[in-house]
Amino acid sequence: MGMTTSIDKPLDNSTVSELTQFSNGKPQNSGDIKDSFLNILVAQLKNQDPTNPMSNSELTSQVAQISTVEGIEKLNKTLGSIVGQMDNHQTLQKVALIGRGIMVSGNDYGNETLVSANEAGNISTTALGYELDRPADNVKITIKNKSGVVVREMEFNKSDFRSAEFLSAGVHSFEWDGQDTDGNAVEGGAYHFTISANQEDQMLTIHPLRYAKVSGVVRQEKGTKLDLGLVGTANMDEVRQIL
């Protein structure tokens, strides 16, 4: 009487000889694994002990396992395809931003705005920005020169209906007119600003944002990033506002 053969047990010499034709190398994918598994299963069924055959539950369990392997491989391929499409879409988004102004975190790049004067003596400034986690009653912006001297203070208060849009939760940006407290044009150069906010006399968390212009897209080891010139580089998730 033949020896009982189980999928979970080593094969005898006769079974191994019969399976040699099915195994020419290591399977490369779930399809190869499934084909080899089915060949082994057929060979084992042919060589099992007729008086002690494999149970239905054991057969069902083995088939379910190989089906699971095949399903996981198909899922991985699908996810890989989706990730690739998302990467391509993000790259197109980044390219579309070339030449555009954006607001990025001031905590990462320094809460500084650059001010310059042209030959005609006119002042042009880059945008100032901030982000509020929740609505504020008051927002105060203090602008200092490179020596740390305060040249201008600006406030948005809930008592002024024109300030309402600058006090709501979210991202806000505006342009400084380049004038000091007395209304005189400041000299060209770099100026730093700090921002504070409060609600019912309690200080709120406020995130300063810095203006930058997208000059290009650079490919790095961990993906593509926005080239912001002297400001550095930034990921899309660091962009808080597109101007």
Image (cartoon, rainbow, N blue to C red):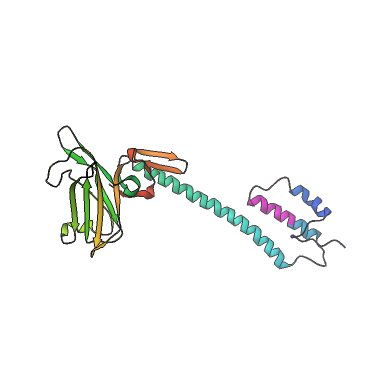
Image position, residue 58 (x, y; %): 71, 65
Image position, residue 201 (x, y; %): 23, 64
- Asked if residue 1 is positioned above or below residue 75 in the image, the reply reads below
Q: Nearer the viewer, residue 95 or 183?
A: 183
Q: Nearer the viewer, residue 33 or 232?
A: 232
- Asked if residue 45 is positioned above or below residue 26 in the image, the reply reads below
Q: Main secondary structure of the magenta part?
A: helix
Left or right relative to 177: residue 51: right
Q: Quadrant of residue 93?
A: top left
Q: Which residues are magenta?
A: 25-40
- For image coordinates 80% across by 54% down, the residue present is 15
**How many labels sit on residues?**
0
| Residue 201 is inside the magenta segment | no
Left or right relative to 222: residue 236: left
Q: Quadrant of residue 99?
A: top left
Left or right relative to 139: residue 109: right
**Which residue is outermost to the right?**
1
Image position, residue 33 (x, y; %): 67, 52
| Residue 38 is inside the magenta segment | yes
- For image coordinates 22% across by 61% down, the residue present is 137
- Asked if residue 91 is positioned above or below residue 168 in the image, the reply reads above
Q: Quadrant of the N terminus?
A: bottom right
**Which residue is outermost to the top?**
119
Image position, residue 115 (x, y; %): 22, 40
Left or right relative to 68: residue 198: left
- For image coordinates 74% across by 48% down, the residue present is 23
- For image coordinates 12% across by 42% down, the residue present is 184
